[in-house]
Image: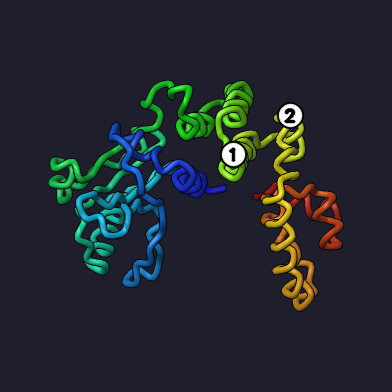
Amino acid sequence: MRTDSLFYQLFQTFPELVFELINQPYVEGYQFSSREIKELSRRFDGIFMPKEGIVNQPIYFVEVQFQPKPDFYWRFITEAMIYLGQYQPANDWSAIAIFAQRSLDPGVPHQYRGFLLSQQLVRVYLDELGEPPATSLGRGIIELVLETEAKVIEKAPILMDFARENIDDVGRKQKILELIETTLVYKLTSLSREEIEAMFSLDDLKQTRYFREYAANLKKELAPELKQQGKQEGKLETVPLLSELGLSVEEIATKLNLDLEAVKKVIDSN
């Protein structure tokens, strides 16, 4: 999976996490969202917006980078400027560039040095953050992304136990456990999803009412499309999504009437 997709899920679940990364106090009411930039025919996926009507709090543009990208700042700042020109908000703004490590930072072009000097452009290097606080689940999940497989296997159960014991809201608790599971699938590539679930006792995710209803609704939505296509290719395209919902290889193969090995191959390639 794409690492930035995982981080955007993290920011939606833990809106306070971005403020923690830039050493700023969290302001209640911020929401993580995406907005369309018409001039670029794309969406700006990382925007923290204050509550509607509050103009004395800044808008935060956030970009996560785990791969080398020489034109990173040219694209990031350009997108922010186009957004501001298109929506013309009354709020001030700040751009937060989050790199897995300092070596991935291509350096701020001198044309943008004013943003750096004014601290409207803030850079974060995840590998230099140090050990996260025990109470910060968001930081803990980031650490899983950066750690070795051995450390992931050691630390993931601790995070899951903390979430189970300290998060009272059932929906939020489930979302956090799903994020941890997604991180494990991303990191522990030598293990199947079934092996990961068995190792970390994540099977309880499949037993929640939310999960069952979501899976049932998804299958209803997919049924007409699958019937109309009537092709193996169309069925195979739905395999990753059903796998992300937690269905086993055998369940997916049975539901879609596909060969077991074909399903395994699709899941292993994602």
Q: Which residue is mark 1?
A: 173
- Asked if one can make out residue 186 in the rendered structure from this viewpoint, the answer is no
- Asked if one can make out residue 129 in the rendered structure from this viewpoint, the answer is yes
Give me the residue at 17% from left, 47% from top. 115
In this rendering, is residue 269 above or below 230? above
Specify whether 194 is left or right of 154: right
State which quadrant residue 79 falls in.
bottom left
Give me the residue at 31% from left, 56% from top. 75
Specify whether 96 is left or right of 144: left
Give me the residue at 28% from left, 35% from top. 24
Specify whether 139 is left or right of 80: right
Q: Nearer the viewer, residue 118 or 24?
A: 24
Q: Secondary structure at mark 1?
A: helix
Query: Label 1 sits on what residue type?
Result: Lys
> Label 1: how many residues lie within 10 Å, few (<14), some (14-19) or many (20+)?
some
State which quadrant residue 190 falls in.
top right
Q: Nearer the viewer, residue 178 or 81?
A: 178
Query: Where residue 224 appears, x then y in whole percent?
Result: 75, 75
Disc assigned to residue 50: none
Query: Label 2 sits on what residue type?
Result: Met
Structural distance between the alpha carbons of marks 1 and 2: 19 Å
Give me the residue at 35% from left, 49% from top. 30
Q: Which residue is mark 2?
A: 199
In this rendering, is residue 130 above or below 81? above
In this rendering, is residue 152 above or below 65? above
Badge nearest the viewer, 1 or 2: 1
Query: Where residue 156 appears, x then y in whole percent?
Result: 60, 27
Specify whether 135 is left or right of 257: left
